[in-house]
Image (cartoon, coloured by chain):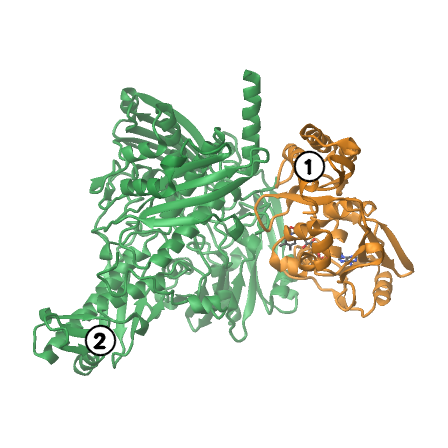
Chain colours: A green, B orange
């Protein structure tokens, strides 16, 4: 791949690599401004309580404290990332709804004073009964958390396509299984941070965010300001994974505190506060019923799910829809029913985390499918090949899937993992498993209803042509988007990458873009960049044609040389042509904008899951289990991806490694735990156990050829899709190793130990 | 998280340090590597009025051979000092391996052996093997010093017999008849995780007969715990697979684990059974590893 291209398809080093590796890169928390204050938020100690009174007078008296704010000082406008359920306010007004809820904030001359001031704020609470389990929350008589969600039902979904009951009647075999997932948290290395300062009626916010646009939009809405008076920008961001897409209390508080004090205010979460802010993965409870033919062809599926949303909704309605919507993509079947109840509980609010709503259902479905294969006596990899979706098809819920190479991915994974030599032939305690996944390459519609384009890009060539700057609103959060978009710009322009600069994610200086979520930037921001580059190329060729007395069609430009296609030795440099353009016509600028065509059906919730293109992935993993202690060792993993044309193979494979790493953590180790009061019990990196380098197995990441017609150069996503098969492939490998199924994530050592113990006891009973 | 206010002292001599500790009273805290003290202070679990740092006290981080081939380990030796010590690599590589299983490299660079002991947390990694090897500790106070077996030091979680004015200065491992020793830590990931259960074993073998055995359990009782019944079962016996299994079961019965977020009581008890067998087998077959 990439042979016909000059800049894309090549593993150029990431442009921020040296700065990050040498520690020179500055993150938001590193920034300092003259006169800057430090702000902190006061969090609720109760999971559910009425606020009777807040007394800030003692805190205000503490020397060094410059401002103390509560709900009385800020708008009571409700917000949330998705307008379907605006239910959060900057500070709690009448009630707190989880341990960690936002009650007040202070700004002081330093962090220590700010912390001390928090202790001096007196809040009288009337403690209310709380509920931490979604099933308990849905029971009659459970404590009501929100007036607007009677029975604690936040979202209810009932979709039915085709006729599932009929499919089950006609099926050779119908199987029902139940699985559950756990709460996990993104745990980006860099904690959330926000710095705000005002000049006149304009405010600037530096934020560690995945979307400068959404933050600008929500700040404008809540504070009743024109968007133009709010500038959001960022420096380097140390990871997001979905946890930095929602506006946080830091952003709102910093803006207000700096307005009151007239000084810059910096605010950071500590690690535990990050767990309070959460927006991590929902715990889902998943019942699946599937009918198949004797040969293993899926006829119909019924997904009946419950999810724990925690206190505030954020993007949670979309998570609920995603959980069911994307189950239809991988395998082709004509009958599908999806029922979902998203309950609110007195725990931190959940949201989007790498794979958004989908990884746990994939874990459930892929585990379920392995059971079905076993019931039918079919190889698990084979049953997936039998059902794999074909390209140029439409799912039962109206998603158009053009390129799709899942079958090829499965076949290649079978080859490179040595599946045939291993499946059923490994020694005791060893197992191999397969799981499939994939994702949207950008959500078809933005988070709020708007007719804005998805992405806009501008390229400005410097007066003398010696450099060019790409302006984009796409957000580099560590995934490499700045590098990839520059590669795309250089390719489209016919210009050398080394001469390009980027100004990104700054609502004043750069361009509009919705940001880094839903795996959208390579495709969507990439479209805008490609069009901007092509406009430059057009202008260069026209100007060169004038200079060379030929027609533009006779010319091409590559790597900064404009040449006659028939006689490449007859050439001009890009620089001299660009300079001529500048002298004759003014600044050489190219602009591109991208908006997908109308996608999806018309039923309720039809928009969620739509996308111009869908990736597909197969993962195979081999594990070893210590049958006495339950310890799991992941020995090796293989990922084969259909992600369309690859712009930067090194960055792509790094995404696969990172995604597998993250999925592996969620499979075996990671779970947010709570004490009996609903407080996070392991809100630190010692007890919220993400895997370490020593836990990571060798990962082979390979590709299958695929070019999507709806994407610039045929690209698709990789960042999230590669996390979606992992839990299932490990669960299936663990099942293969021990012969009993653990139905709940994470598949901890203790659960493995217990399952094996019970298995042995049963065998003894029989004997 | 921030550090509460405190006074800071860094005395130049041991006697000065002990006098200070006596004078300042119970609100003063000794500070070695600080990996435990600082994090507890930041979490508001500990509010010492004064910190007495050991950093200026010379000679307390040496690891050397003393009289009669005793191994002397200075209390300020870091975990990485243990790992890198030629003396330990020669005499008790098992101690190097135990230290290597701790925390992460950053913590191993500043965390000290003394801190790991005086901290007195049930899951600490060094006490089990040190006790198994019969280590003694020297405590120096304002009015004198005493030497006692490490085994007698712990009285409960975060509790020990140390007096307010006392500083742990060194460990003494006298020449022992042991032919093998080892420490097995069971944790929930390969690095940076505290023990769910751990077992140290030291054995003196003569051919296939066990002359003496010590088994010390970690993270499964309020203090490191010697599994004495299991030890007795082995003493003077020919080693067989069945005997090792029985010893494991006995140790498991002797353990007193609790359930917490790292594991249930039942799980820990069974881990003790498995790990005891494994540790004994390793010490018997592989020497000090
Ligand atoms: C990220 C992390 C991971 C960790 N992982 C592990 C692990 O895997 N296994 C493990 O066992 N521990 C672990 N720990 C705990 C800790 O690092 C170790 O126990 C370490 O050995 C403590 O030594 P220190 O010198 O830092 O102690 P300090 O924090 O300085 O002191 C600890 C206690 O001992 C007292 N003290 C210290 N030295 C003396 C002395 N010479 N005389 C009298 N009193 C003294 C102090 O007053 C304090 O009460 C970890 C800690 C962290 C932060």
Pinpoint residue B44: horizontal percent, then vertical percent. 68, 55
Q: Is residue A67 left or right of residue B68?
A: left
Q: Quadrant of the C terminus of chain A?
A: top right
Residue bearing the label numbered 1: B276
In the rendered image, is residue A433 in sight? yes
Q: From mark 1 to mark 2, how far is it between C-alphas?
A: 75 Å
Task: Depth check: give the residue in front, A558 or B96.
Answer: B96
**Circle 2 Cα neighbour tier, 10 Å, few/some/many (<14 / 14–19 / ≥20):** many
Residue on which the image places disc 2? A588
Closest to the observer, A256 or A703 = A703
The image quadrant in which ligand 1 is located: bottom right
Image coordinates of residue B141 in percent, x first then y, are 87, 59
Q: Say if B64 sits above or below A296 in the image.
A: below
Residue occupying the far right of the picture: B143
Q: Which mark is drawn over residue A431?
A: none
Instruction: Output the chain of dot 2.
Output: A
In this view, the mark in front (1 or 2): 1
Residue A446: x percent and y percent?
Answer: 31, 52
The residue at 72%/44% (across/down) is B180
Indicate the position of residue A475 as horizontal and vertical percent values. 37, 61
User: Is A414 on the left or on the right of A738, as rendered?
Assistant: left
Q: Are marks 1 and 2 on the same chain?
A: no
Residue A747 seen: no
Labels 1 and 2 touching (C-beta < 8 A): no
Q: In the displayed structure, would residue B270 be above or below residue A500?
A: above
State the SS at label 2.
strand
Q: Check mark 2 vs ligand 1: CB closer than 8 Å? yes or no.
A: no
Q: Is residue B249 left or right of residue A700?
A: right
Mark 1 belongs to chain: B
Q: Residue at x 47, y 56 (%)?
A: A248
């Amino acid at each position: 791949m990439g042979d016909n291209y000059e800049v894309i398809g090549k593993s150029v080093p990431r442009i921020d690599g040296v700065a990050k590796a040498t520690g020179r890169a500055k993150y938001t928390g590193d920034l300092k401004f003259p006169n800057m204050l430090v702000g902190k938020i006061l969090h609720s100690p109760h999971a559910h309580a009425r606020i009777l009174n807040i007394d800030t007078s003692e805190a205000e008296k503490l020397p060094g404290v410059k401002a103390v704010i509560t709900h009385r000082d800020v708008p009571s406008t409700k917000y949330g990332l998705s307008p379907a359920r605006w239910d959060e306010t900057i500070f709690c007004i009448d009630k707190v709804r989880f341990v960690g809820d936002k009650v007040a904030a202070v700004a002081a001359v330093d962090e220590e004073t700010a912390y001390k001031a928090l202790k001096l704020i007196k809040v009288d609470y009337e403690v209310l009964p709380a509920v931490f389990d979604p099933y308990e929350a849905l029971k009659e008589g459970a404590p009501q958390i929100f007036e607007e969600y009677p029975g604690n039902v936040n979202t209810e979904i009932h979709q039915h396509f085709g006729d599932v009951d009929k499919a089950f009647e006609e099926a050779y075999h119908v199987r029902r299984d139940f699985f559950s997932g756990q709460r996990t948290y993104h745990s980006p290395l860099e904690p959330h941070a926000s710095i705000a300062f005002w000049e006149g009626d304009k405010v600037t916010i530096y934020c560690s965010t995945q979307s400068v646009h959404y933050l600008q939009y929500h700040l404008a809405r809540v504070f009743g300001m024109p968007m133009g008076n709010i500038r959001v920008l960022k420096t380097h961001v140390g990871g997001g994974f979905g946890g930095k897409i929602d506006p946080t209390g830091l952003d709102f508080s910093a803006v207000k505190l700096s307005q009151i004090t007239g000084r810059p205010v910096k605010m950071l979460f500590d690690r535990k506060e990050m767990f309070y802010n959460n927006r991590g993965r929902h715990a889902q409870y998943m019942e699946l019923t599937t009918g198949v033919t004797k040969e293993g062809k899926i006829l119909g599926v019924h997904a009946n799910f419950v999810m724990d949303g925690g206190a505030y909704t954020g993007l949670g309605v979309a998570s609920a829809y995603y959980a069911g919507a994307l189950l239809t993509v991988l395998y082709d079947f004509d009958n599908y029913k999806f029922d979902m109840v998203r309950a609110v509980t007195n725990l931190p609010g959940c949201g989007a985390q790498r794979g958004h709503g989908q990884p746990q259902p994939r874990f459930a479905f892929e585990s379920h499918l392995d059971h079905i294969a076993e019931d039918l006596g079919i190889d698990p990899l084979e049953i997936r090949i039998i059902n794999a979706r074909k390209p140029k098809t439409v799912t039962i819920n109206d998603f158009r899937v053009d390129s799709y190479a899942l079958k090829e991915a499965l076949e290649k994974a079978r080859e490179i993992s040595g599946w045939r030599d291993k499946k059923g032939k490994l020694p005791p305690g060893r197992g191999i498993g397969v799981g499939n996944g994939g994702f949207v390459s950008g959500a078809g519609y933005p988070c709020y209803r708007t007719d804005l384009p998805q992405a806009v890009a501008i390229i400005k060539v410097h007066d003398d042509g010696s450099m060019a700057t790409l302006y984009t609103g796409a957000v580099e959060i560590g995934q490499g988007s700045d590098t990839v978009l520059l590669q795309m710009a250089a390719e489209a322009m016919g210009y050398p990458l080394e001469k390009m600069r980027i100004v990104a994610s700054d609502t004043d200086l750069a361009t509009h873009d919705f940001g880094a979520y839903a795996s959208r930037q390579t495709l969507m921001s990439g479209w805008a960049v490609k069009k901007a580059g092509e406009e430059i190329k057009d202008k260069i060729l026209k100007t060169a044609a004038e200079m060379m007395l030929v027609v533009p069609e006779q010319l091409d430009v590559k790597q900064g040389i404009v040449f006659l296609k028939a006689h490449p030795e007859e050439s001009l440099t890009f620089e001299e042509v660009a300079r001529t353009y500048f002298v004759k016509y003014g600044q050489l600028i190219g602009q591109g904008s991208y908006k997908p065509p109308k996608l999806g059906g018309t039923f309720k919730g039809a928009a969620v899951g739509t996308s111009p293109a869908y990736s597909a992935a197969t993962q195979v993993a081999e594990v070893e289990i210590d049958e006495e202690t339950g310890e799991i060792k992941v020995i090796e993993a293989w990922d084969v991806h259909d992600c369309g044309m690859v712009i930067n193979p090194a960055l792509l494979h790094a995404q696969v490694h990172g995604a597998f790493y993250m999925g592996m953590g969620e499979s075996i180790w990671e779970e947010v735990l709570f004490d009996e009061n609903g407080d996070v019990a392991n809100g630190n990196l010692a007890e919220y156990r993400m895997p370490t380098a020593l836990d990571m197995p060798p990962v082979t990441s390979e590709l299958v050829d695929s070019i999507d017609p709806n994407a610039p150069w045929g690209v698709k996503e990789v960042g999230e899709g590669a996390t979606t098969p992992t839990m299932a492939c490990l669960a299936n490998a663990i099942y293969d190793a021990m012969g009993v199924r653990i139905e709940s994530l994470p598949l901890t050592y203790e659960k493995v130990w217990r399952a094996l113990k019970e298995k042995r006891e049963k065998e003894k009973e029989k004997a | 998280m921030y550090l509460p206010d405190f006074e800071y002292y860094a005395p130049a001599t041991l006697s000065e340090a002990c006098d200070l500790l006596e004078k300042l009273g119970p609100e003063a805290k000794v500070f070695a590597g600080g990996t435990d003290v600082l994090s507890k202070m930041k979490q508001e679990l500990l509010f010492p009025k004064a910190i007495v740092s050991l950093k200026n006290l010379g000679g307390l981080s040496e690891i050397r051979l003393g009289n009669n081939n005793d191994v002397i380990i200075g209390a300020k030796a870091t975990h990485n000092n243990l790992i890198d010590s030629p003396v330990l690599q020669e005499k008790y590589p098992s101690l190097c391996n135990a230290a290597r299983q701790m925390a992460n490299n950053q913590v191993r660079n500043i965390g000290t052996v003394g801190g790991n002991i005086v901290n007195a947390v049930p899951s600490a990694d060094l006490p089990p093997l040190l006790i198994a090897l019969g280590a003694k500790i020297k405590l120096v106070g304002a009015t004198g010093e005493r030497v006692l077996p490490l085994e007698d030091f712990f009285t409960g979680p975060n509790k020990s017999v140390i007096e307010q004015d006392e500083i742990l200065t060194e460990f003494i491992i006298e020449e022992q008849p042991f032919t093998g020793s080892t420490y097995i830590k069971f944790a929930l990931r390969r690095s940076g995780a505290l023990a769910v259960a751990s077992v140290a074993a030291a054995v003196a073998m003569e051919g296939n007969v066990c002359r003496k055995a010590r088994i010390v359990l970690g993270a499964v009782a309020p203090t490191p715990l010697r599994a004495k019944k299991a030890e007795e079962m082995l003493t003077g016996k020919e080693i067989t697979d069945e005997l090792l299994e029985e010893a494991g079961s006995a140790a498991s019965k002797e353990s007193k684990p609790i359930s917490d977020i790292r594991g249930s009581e039942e799980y820990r008890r069974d881990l003790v059974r498995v790990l005891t067998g494994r540790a004994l087998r390793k010490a018997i077959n592989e020497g000090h590893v």
